[in-house]
Image: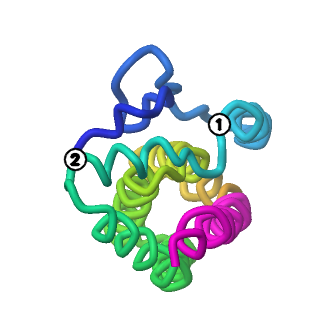
Amino acid sequence: MSISGSSSGVGGAGPAHTPPQSAAAPSPVSNRIDAELPLVDLAVLQDLSDQLAHPAVAQNFARDYATLWSQRYQKLAAAVDRQDVAAALDAVISMKIASAMVGGLRLARLAEQLEGFIRNGDLQNGHALIAAVELHGSATVKELQDTYILADE
């Protein structure tokens, strides 16, 4: 499934892909990304709706994403806290893909950064991104609810 309505490069393709920063400071990278990417790109959801040829399916996907956000976040945070690399990687990849599919470009990029830290075994810097993931994830869900899910009900 394509997210061609975006220019984020989420998923590692294209020149917009930014490899995870190592060592000291994920925060400046996160702040720059926060400024350049929207919380929700509704064009991605429109593209999903067009590809599926049924708007209700895309809306149900967005509703399910919002419903599962807390569970998805808690699974990721717990795995990072336990330093369980395999579980953290599974959770962050799920978050990254689902966020990209629903148009949550900022969260998808943060998850991509976190995935890089996890893959490199750098759970300390990964842990530093967990608060940003929670903040942007909650904001993404709220924006989805305000602009897409409830707008079509």
Q: Secondary structure at mark 2?
A: helix
Task: Please tell me whether residue 40 belongs to the stretch shown in magenta.
Answer: no
The extreme top residue here reads 15
The crowding category of the residue bearing disc 1, from other C-alpha atoms within 10 Å (few below 14, some 14 to 19, many at least 20), is: some
Query: Rounded to the nearest whole Å, what is the CA distance between mark 1 and mark 2?
Result: 23 Å
The residue identified by callout 2 is: 51
The residue identified by callout 1 is: 37
- Can residue 121 be seen here? The reply is no
Residue at the spot x=32%, y=62% of the render?
Answer: 55
Residue numbers of the magenta segment = 130-153
Q: Are marks 1 and 2 in contact (CB under 8 Å)?
A: no
Q: Nearer the viewer's eye, disc 1 or disc 2?
A: 2
Pinpoint residue 136: horizontal percent, then vertical percent.
68, 59
Q: For this rendering, which residue is in front, 69 or 18?
A: 69
- Can residue 111 be seen here? The reply is yes
Residue at the spot x=35%, y=39% of the render?
Answer: 3
Quarter residue 150 falls in: bottom right
Left or right: where does residue 55 sit relative to residue 30? left
Q: Earlier in the sequence, mark 1 or mark 2?
A: 1
Q: For this rendering, which residue is in front, 43 or 69?
A: 43
Q: For this rendering, which residue is in front, 97 or 44?
A: 44
Left or right: where does residue 60 sit relative to residue 50? right
Quarter residue 62 falls in: bottom left
Taken as a whole, is the magenta stretch helix, strand or loop?
Answer: helix
The crowding category of the residue bearing disc 2, from other C-alpha atoms within 10 Å (few below 14, some 14 to 19, many at least 20), is: few
